[in-house]
């Protein structure tokens, strides 16, 4: 009895001549990868368990989740991986390289019949060239790095026979969305799926990658394409040697064989929330959009960029709409530059980023905000995956056309004039009311509290409230991060009590203009900050927020120690150490400061 494609590959990488569904076997892994997402955990597992690296020549890091290096937590993880790579002679495909699974294909690391694992859940994209790829957790990957093999349960196989001719306007992404419409998110769950038929044989490498990428959204272990002659030549050129084609046996046994008439496929769009909630594009036509995204491991290929450029040539992105484009790899980026595609995108008003995962990860362009409607070429649109807005999934052609139109449309129905945004209500211009606000009179002009005496100059806003927390907008959440970047005071937020007072030295609050560096103290219930001087922007922010700050000339006469209790009079500027009753005269509140303070803030 013959074997299916996955059975053939797994048998070739095990000690068994024949394997069958549900067999649990150890398989040798040709390529062992880890991304910046999860890579640091792989390192931790190896180090904590005293393991080594089985074969550094087969082991790689790929930094594709945060290729801009813009997130400090990712930057830390990336550096952990770099240091480990240096110590173990492991190659790093760094933040300028692109998506790891695509690099495995471009670099000739994987090819027909080979095996690969990485921390990317879309590693099954390698089925596009007839290779077995799997995304795994960091423990699995650590074992693969240390041992060279992992256990795997041989899945059952399904064979899809595509009959008929593919319609001209149906793209590879449309094929994937039509398959999702038929099989949903779980009908193919746990299966290895093989694609056959004349229409399939004609698919290019880029088209196969698009379809294979969405196998995860269908629940499949992998979607397999047996390489045609053109793709075998591509792999051989990348590997630098002659390769043997690995394919299913003619008498292989499949769990199911399903015929699909591709001639009936239509252009489709996935509605927000579920990739498998796909509908004919006509049912969502003219849905107004705020943004559009072309990229991801599904549609960041050169053919995708050419399709987008053809539509954008001589056109402009609709006013108010943001179009973001991210090539899958740096090689594709360079090719787009050489072909003039980058200039077309720029002329059209698109935003172009360096290669990487982009919209599917938080470290690059492609994320959206609450209430934002995005049409994207990504593979997932789960709530929160690409931001807090709503995401429709579609082909590059539909996304590009929609970006120009300002609403969801196809390339054949781009309007002469785009749809513009209109205000939801007629908002009349309002001038600031001149009527005097009623002032609150119950705010204390004299306070008492325990003092945190921090004998440091130049405590900047990053030390007070680090920029990694700037996305926080709820003041109630800010206090917990106060001073967590100030050496020696990382536990301040946990130990400080409402009513405490902070006393520092020169130039407190220098640096950025972030209001959070004031609001974090308000969040904790800190009564005031006293300093010899303040950063100019910080001083304004504090006064405008009605947060008491007091400036002194000299503090020595107070004979003050950390945790002493002090009294502060905002009106007179007197500061008294209640432990020894010594008093100094600091600057009292100005008339403006007192007025804003008693008013409860600028507003």
Image: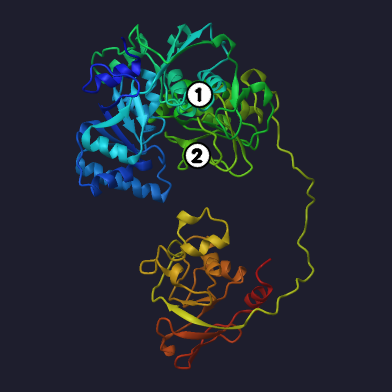
Residue assigned mark 2: 365
Q: Along the polypeptide, which appears first: circle 1 or circle 2?
A: 1
Which image quarter: residue 468?
Answer: bottom left
Residue at 44% x, 89% y is: 558
Q: Where residue 345 appears, x then y in whole percent?
A: 53, 29
Q: Which one is nearer the viewer's eye here, 26 or 304?
A: 26
Residue at 21% x, 22% y is: 15
Q: Check disc 2: other Cα within 10 Å, few if <14, some if 14-19, many if 20+.
A: many
Using the image, determine if residue 457 lies above or below residue 128: below
Left or right: 362 with respect to 272?
left
Secondary structure beneath dot 1 equals loop
Q: Where residue 510 appears, x then y in whole percent?
A: 46, 66
Task: Tell me, yes or no, if residue 515 can be seen here.
Answer: no
Residue sitting farthest toward the bottom: 581
Residue assigned mark 1: 187
Residue at 64% x, 75% y is: 597
Using the image, determine if residue 528 lies above or below residue 378: below
Residue sitting farthest toward the front: 22
Q: Nearer the viewer, mark 1 or mark 2?
A: 1
Tell me the colour scheme of the image. rainbow
Left or right: 214 with respect to 89?
right
Q: Which one is nearer the viewer's eye here, 19 or 438?
A: 19
Q: Where residue 327 appears, x then y in whole percent?
A: 45, 30
Q: Which one is nearer the viewer's eye here, 330 or 283?
A: 283
Left or right: 356 with respect to 14?
right
């Amino acid at each position: 009895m013959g074997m299916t494609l996955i059975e053939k590959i797994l048998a070739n990488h095990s000690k068994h001549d024949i394997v069958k569904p549900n067999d649990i076997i150890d398989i040798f892994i040709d390529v062992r990868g880890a991304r910046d997402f999860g890579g640091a955990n792989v390192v931790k597992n190896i180090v904590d368990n005293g393991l080594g690296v089985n074969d550094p020549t087969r082991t790689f890091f790929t930094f594709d989740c945060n290729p801009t290096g813009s997130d400090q937590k990712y930057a830390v993880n990336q550096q952990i991986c770099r240091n480990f790579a240096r110590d173990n002679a492991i190659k790093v495909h760094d933040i300028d390289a692109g998506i790891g699974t695509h690099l495995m294909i471009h670099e000739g690391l994987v090819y027909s019949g080979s095996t690969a694992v990485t921390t990317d859940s879309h590693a099954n994209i390698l089925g596009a060239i007839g290779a077995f790829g799997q995304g795994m957790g960091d423990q699995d990957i650590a074992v693969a790095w240390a041992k060279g093999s992992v256990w795997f349960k041989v899945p059952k196989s399904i064979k899809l026979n595509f009959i008929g001719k593919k319609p001209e306007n149906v793209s590879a992404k449309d094929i994937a969305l039509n398959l999702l419409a038929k099989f949903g998110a779980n009908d193919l769950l746990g299966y290895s799926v093989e694609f056959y038929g004349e229409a399939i044989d004609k698919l290019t490498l880029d088209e196969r990658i698009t379809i294979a990428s969405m196998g995860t959204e269908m629940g499949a272990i992998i979607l397999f394409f047996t390489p045609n002659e053109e793709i075998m030549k591509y792999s051989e050129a990348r590997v630098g040697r002659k390769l043997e084609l690995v394919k299913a046996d003619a008498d292989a046994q499949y769990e199911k064989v399903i015929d699909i008439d591709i001639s009936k496929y239509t252009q489709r769009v996935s509605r927000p929330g579920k990739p498998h909630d796909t509908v004919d594009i006509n049912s969502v036509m003219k849905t107004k959009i705020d943004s559009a995204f072309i990229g991801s491991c599904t549609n960041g290929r050169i053919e995708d960029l050419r399709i987008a450029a053809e539509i954008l040539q001589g056109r402009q992105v609709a006013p108010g709409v943001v179009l973001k484009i991210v090539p899958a790899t740096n090689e594709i980026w360079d090719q787009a530059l050489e072909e003039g595609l980058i200039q077309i995108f720029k002329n059209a008003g698109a935003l172009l980023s360096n290669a990487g995962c982009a919209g599917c990860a938080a470290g690059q362009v492609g994320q959206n905000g609450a209430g934002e409607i995005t049409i994207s070429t990504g593979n997932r649109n789960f709530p929160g995956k690409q931001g807090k807005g709503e995401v429709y999934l579609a082909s590059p052609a539909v996304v590009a056309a929609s970006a120009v139109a300002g609403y969801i449309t196809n390339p054949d129905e781009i309007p002469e004039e785009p749809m513009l945004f209109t205000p939801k209500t007629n908002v009349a211009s309002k001038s600031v009311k001149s009527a005097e606000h009623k002032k609150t009179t119950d705010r204390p002009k004299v306070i008492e509290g325990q003092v945190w005496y921090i004998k440091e100059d130049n405590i900047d806003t990053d030390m007070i409230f680090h920029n990694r927390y700037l996305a926080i907008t709820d003041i109630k959440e800010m206090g917990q991060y106060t001073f967590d970047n100030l050496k020696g005071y990382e536990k301040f937020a946990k130990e400080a009590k409402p009513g405490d007072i902070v006393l520092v030295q020169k130039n407190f609050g220098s640096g950025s203009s972030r209001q959070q560096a004031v609001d974090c103290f308000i969040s904790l219930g800190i009564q005031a900050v006293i300093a010899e001087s303040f950063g100019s922007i910080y001083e304004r922010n504090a006064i405008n927020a009605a947060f008491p700050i007091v400036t002194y000339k000299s503090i020595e006469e107070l004979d003050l120690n950390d945790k002493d209790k002090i009294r502060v009079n905002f009106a007179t500027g007197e500061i008294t150490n209640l432990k020894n009753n010594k008093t100094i005269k600091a600057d009292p509140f100005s008339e403006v400061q007192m007025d804003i303070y008693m008013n409860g803030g600028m507003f």
